[in-house]
Amino acid sequence: MKNVTKISFIILAAYTDVGHVKYLYFTILLALYVCIIFANVLVIIVICMDKALHEPMYLFLCSLCVNELYGSTGLFPCLLVNLISDTHEISFSYCYLQMYCLYTYATVEYCNLSVMSYDRYMSICRPLQYNRIMTQRRVCFLILLAWSYSFCQFTVTLSLNLRLHLCGNVMEKVWCDNYLLVRLSCSDTTVNNIYGLYATVLTICAPLVLMLYSYIRIIKITFRSSKNAKKKSLSTCAPHIVSLLNYSIGCSFEIIQSRLPKANIPSTLRIIISIYFLMIPPLVNPIMYGLKMAKIRKAYIPFSFLVAFCPYTSSLHPPLHLIPEPPP
């Protein structure tokens, strides 16, 4: 196979010269990365060690936290190094590696949130059949499906990119972006654009249909239930809805702003938007799903010296057998 490009590095031109303030930013981002690692690893350890938490809801949560660690590791090390560097260069091979990590993280996150909505639908709308349908084997299959689809889908994208000949190496971003990389190409990108559109539509529409179906059924059955059942349903679905909206809005802003002219958005705001969906969900999700769930808090007793520093620990009921099936 011929060498597709003579370019050996990519210049991430979105970094601005902020003088010695960059060390303050470095410290803040490093602290944020440490908090993300700590929060997600803690939830993973608690779920793995406590057999009472080996239920579908918590297994999906464990998969979500593993993905948060995976995505954060794809972003933060390179971001921290480039922040204090004067050149803001990234090797061509590492650029592809970072793209692979971040794009698969984004797809796994969305698919995982989708199957979590399905789990809530099953537990609320079909509680009598829940244990028969949501077996550990099926849960593992759904988790494996979300991860394998994401990796296979972007592997095809990556292989299509490798055939491109690049005529430039300056990217207006703080991380390697697939869309901007394709725009640097002098080759025919028709196949890349067609497959990219197909993959984007499939990745967004399939999980979206499942989530809309799940929540339409949940809303329908909730309105036919008692006031207490409505409150329990809302309390168990609220963390998932907040996390889903937080992630979806962050991704939407990033997709839109990356395709707008640079002059339309201030550079600082552009940077914040571009890394929002990679920073905030990995920090918020362990709090929304982990620290606010009653069963996980109970399992935290051996880690009580850590939980003492977490003020947001109001009780939420697990989403199993919340609402009885309505009479026909």
Image (cartoon, grey):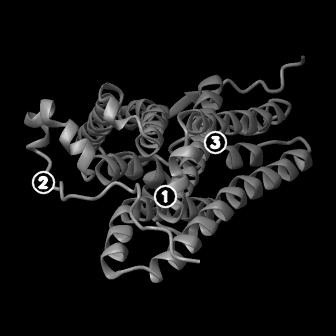
Horizontal side, residue 38 vs residue 243: left or right: left
Front position in the image: 22 or 113: 113
Q: Image height check: is 270 above or below 141?
A: below
Q: Image height check: is 139 above or below 312?
A: above
Q: Earlier in the sequence, mark 3 or mark 2?
A: 3
Q: Amino acid at mark 3?
A: Val
Horizontal side, residue 184 vs residue 266: left or right: right
Nearer the camera: disc 3 or disc 2 = 2
Residue 50, by quadrant, is: top left
- Read off the residue under disc 2: 311
Residue 127, how many percent across, how many down?
49, 58
Residue 184, by quadrant, is: top right
| Residue 176 showing in the rendered view | no
Image disc number at residue 170: 3
Quick check: marks 3 and 2 in contact, CB under 8 Å?
no
Identified at 44% across, 67% down, the residue is 324
- The C terminus - image quarter: bottom right
- Read off the residue under disc 1: 127
Regarding mark 3 in the picture, which secondary structure is present there?
Answer: strand
Regarding mark 1 in the picture, which secondary structure is present there?
Answer: helix
Q: Decide: few, some or many residues near mark 3? Use Cα within 10 Å; few <14, some 14-19, many ≥20.
A: some
Q: Decide: few, some or many residues near mark 1? Use Cα within 10 Å; few <14, some 14-19, many ≥20.
A: many
Identified at 36% across, 80% down, the residue is 226
Q: Image height check: is 155 above or below 245?
A: above
Nearer the camera: disc 3 or disc 1 = 1
Residue 163, how many percent across, how many down?
86, 31
